[in-house]
Amino acid sequence: MNPDVCHGKAGIRGLRYPVDMILKLPSAGRSNEEILGDYDDLKPEDILAALAFAARLSHMQRVRLCCDEIGQPGEDDPFVP
């Protein structure tokens, strides 16, 4: 990711296509053939790479963002077992 390209978002092969934009196209009903026809510089592997990126993100571990002043979860923390 380059902060000077796509506002620092993950992009496709250094092109100025953010991964999230590519992922939205099939979810909006566009076929791979339609996407590749509309974006001449994309390759089929680029769509697969975007899907692989999304799959990896879905496996990320939960990160606790809020703690009390000594670094312990607060009483109202929904993630405390």
Image: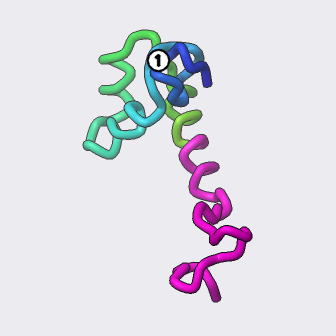
Residue 22: image location, x then y, percent: 41, 32
Residue 28: image location, x then y, percent: 26, 43
Q: Residue at x 33, y 17 (%)?
A: 37
Q: Is residue 72 above or below residue 18?
A: below
Span highlighted in magenta in the image: 52-81
Q: Is residue 2 above or below residue 24?
A: above
Q: Is residue 63 above or below residue 7?
A: below
The residue identified by callout 1 is 42
Residue 75: image location, x then y, percent: 57, 85
Q: Quadrant of residue 3?
A: top right
User: Furthest-left residue in view?
Assistant: 29
Amino acid at the residue labelled 1: Leu
Q: Quadrant of residue 52?
A: top right
Q: Residue at x 61, y 25 (%)?
A: 1
Q: Is residue 41 left or right of residue 48?
A: left
Q: Residue at x 51, y 20 (%)?
A: 43
Q: Is residue 56 one of those drawn in magenta?
A: yes
